[in-house]
Image (cartoon, helix red, strand yellow):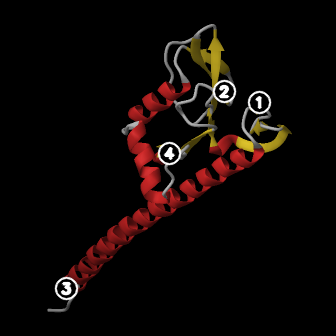
């Protein structure tokens, strides 16, 4: 069991683990699994802070972009494309957090249970109805699309600005060369 953890590109899921009266987190990464001595929401909050924002700020961003106010998917780190969604209200102890990028397949296994298979083959059963799971998955996909579109738009603006300046410099350079080669 470890004391702390920050979500990263390898994090697939953070599931609640109740031991006696304490709530811990089971973290699934692409290559390993371990327990952390903190609640899932505390790992999410700490990871948001690690990447330069608060959890509340990330939720506010989702609300601004999509109008989602409950069970909000969040971008933990936009530069690394780390998007997570909660399976229930994050204030509930049974709330798990899943990485959108690692969900490969899912299917209903009981009335309110969904089996999730991650890239790499790891499978878990989450206490969430198939309909709710799909809603969370699709809302996270929408958030990713909006964020990616905005990031690409800004990169395009920057490229246009840089390339137009390069073009201007190239024109000046050509003019100087012409002036130097001009017959007297």
Measure the C-alpha gap from mark 1 to mark 4: 23 Å
2 and 4 marks in contact (CB < 8 Å): no
Q: Which mark is residue 75?
A: 4
1 and 2 marks in contact (CB < 8 Å): yes
Measure the C-alpha gap from mark 2 to mark 4: 18 Å
Measure the C-alpha gap from mark 3 to mark 4: 54 Å
Instruction: Locate the N terminus by quadrant.
Output: top right
Residue reaching furthest bottom? Answer: 184
> Quick one: SS at disc 3?
helix
The residue at the point 77 percent across, 30 percent down is: 124
The residue at the point 25 percent across, 76 percent down is: 173
In this rendering, the answer to whether 174 lies above or below 75 is below
Residue 78, percent across and down? 47, 47
Q: Which residue is mark 2?
A: 28
> Quick one: SS at disc 1?
strand
In this rendering, the answer to whether 79 lies above or below 151 is above
**Front-most of residues 2 and 89:** 89
Task: Judge whether residue 6 can be spotted in this image.
Answer: no
3 and 2 marks in contact (CB < 8 Å): no
Residue reaching furthest right? Answer: 109
Q: Which residue is mark 3?
A: 179
Q: Earlier in the sequence, mark 2 or mark 4?
A: 2
Q: Residues within 10 Å of mark 4 (few under 14, many from 20)?
A: many
**Front-most of residues 36 and 174:** 36
Q: Residues within 10 Å of mark 1 (few under 14, many from 20)?
A: some
């Amino acid at each position: 069991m470890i004391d702390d953890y920050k979500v990263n590109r390898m994090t697939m899921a953070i599931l609640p683990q109740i031991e006696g009266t304490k709530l811990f987190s089971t973290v699934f990464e692409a290559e390993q699994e371990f327990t952390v001595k903190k609640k899932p929401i505390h790992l999410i909050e700490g990871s948001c802070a690690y990447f330069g924002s608060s959890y509340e700020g990330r939720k506010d961003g989702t609300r601004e972009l999509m109008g989602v106010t409950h069970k909000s998917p969040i971008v933990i780190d936009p530069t690394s494309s780390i998007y997570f969604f909660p399976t229930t209200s994050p204030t509930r102890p049974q709330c798990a957090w899943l990485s959108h990028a690692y969900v490969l397949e899912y299917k209903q296994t009981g009335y309110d249970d969904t089996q999730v298979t991650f890239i790499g083959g790891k499978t878990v059963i989450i206490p969430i109805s198939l309909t709710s799971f799909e809603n969370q998955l699709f809302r996270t996909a929408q958030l990713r699309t909006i964020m990616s579109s905005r990031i690409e738009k800004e990169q395009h603006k920057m490229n246009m600005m840089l390339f137009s300046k390069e073009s201007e410099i190239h024109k000046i350079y050509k003019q100087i060369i012409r002036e130097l080669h001009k017959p007297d």
